[in-house]
Amino acid sequence: MQSNWLRFWIYACLLLGVLLFFSQLAGAQTGNNPTGSRQAALGGSSLVLADVWASFNNPARLANLTGISVGLNYENRFMLKDLGFNSIAAAFPVRPGVLALAVRQFGGQFYNETFAGIAFGRKFGSRFTAGVRLDGYHIRLAENYGSRTVVSFAAGFSASLNSNLEFGAALFNPLKVNAAKDYDETLPSVFRAGLAYKIDQDLVVLLEAEKDIRYKPTLRSGIEYRVIDIFALRGGIATNPSSLSFGFGLFLGRFTLDVSTVKHEILGYSPNVAIIWEAK
């Protein structure tokens, strides 16, 4: 057990070094928000989780899905109506991997943004998965400011370092695509990398880092404990901005219900709920 923990922290230090290196390649503004209520409860850690929300968070992890899966997610950011995120995703196993569709809508009458992505992930051997996603963004401003649709992509991979340790990384919007007609405003471009260490069958610890070139690195960590077969407790923390999160998951046959909330140090609470249906 002690050697496994030592290995975990060695990989964590390597993760931060890799993050700082790749951040020089990924000029950016703000990150794509991790999607999913389970992910929110874990401090935003999302890269190594294999569920339908991988279509947003890391397309490589889609490869681990074995059946059709559909998810609905709603996040009410800071309890404000105009800061709500509505997300839907569906994944379908196809040869030689898994295909997924992901759609997210954000905003209100003065500003809103719609994201749509087509993602594909597949396995390469027993330990490695990779995935890509084609992205479309439609941005609309109120009154006479008009709207704009732009296209970009994302890519990711994951690797099983041993039976207890998973590593994942993803790059979002690496191209400097202009998101506005009349001024220089590019789509956010972000690099993320993360680890998940399975202490035992029911207890998992996650660590993740994100770098936007204009800001300090964001660090995320979370822990998930499967109390009984149908119930899991989760908690997490994040930096820049500082936040605490907690939540739970209920596993009811083909359905999974995830509920969480995130507390920002200044702006308050952001409740989040998601439901997933899986064909088994």
Image (cartoon, helix red, strand yellow):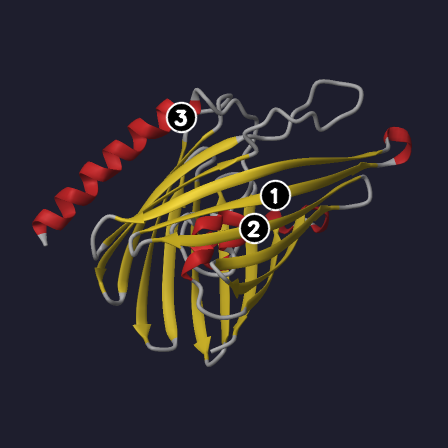
Q: Quadrant of residue 122?
A: bottom left
Circle nearer the N terminus (2, 3)? 3
Residue type at mark 3: give it: Phe
Residue bearing the label numbered 1:
134
**Does residue 175 sit above or below 151 in this rendering?**
above
The percent coordinates of residue 205 (x first, y second) are 28, 53
Residue type at mark 1: give it: Leu
**Does residue 110 sit above or below 27 in this rendering?**
below
**Left or right, residue 231 beside residue 83:** left
Q: CB of mark 2 within 8 Å of CB of mark 3?
A: no
The percent coordinates of residue 82 (x first, y second) are 72, 47
- Residue lying furthest bottom: 253
The dot on residue 22 is 3
Residue bearing the label numbered 2:
119
Q: Secondary structure at mark 1?
A: strand
Give how far apart the Cα atoms at labels 1 and 2 are: 6 Å
- Which residue is more in the foreground, 218 or 21? 21
**Within 10 angstroms of label 1, few (less than 14), some, or many (20 or more) residues?**
some
- Residue lying furthest right: 144
Q: CB of mark 1 within 8 Å of CB of mark 2?
A: yes
Which residue is at a point 40% across and 26% down the rendered structure image? 22
Circle nearer the N terminus (1, 3)? 3
Give how far apart the Cα atoms at labels 2 and 3 are: 23 Å
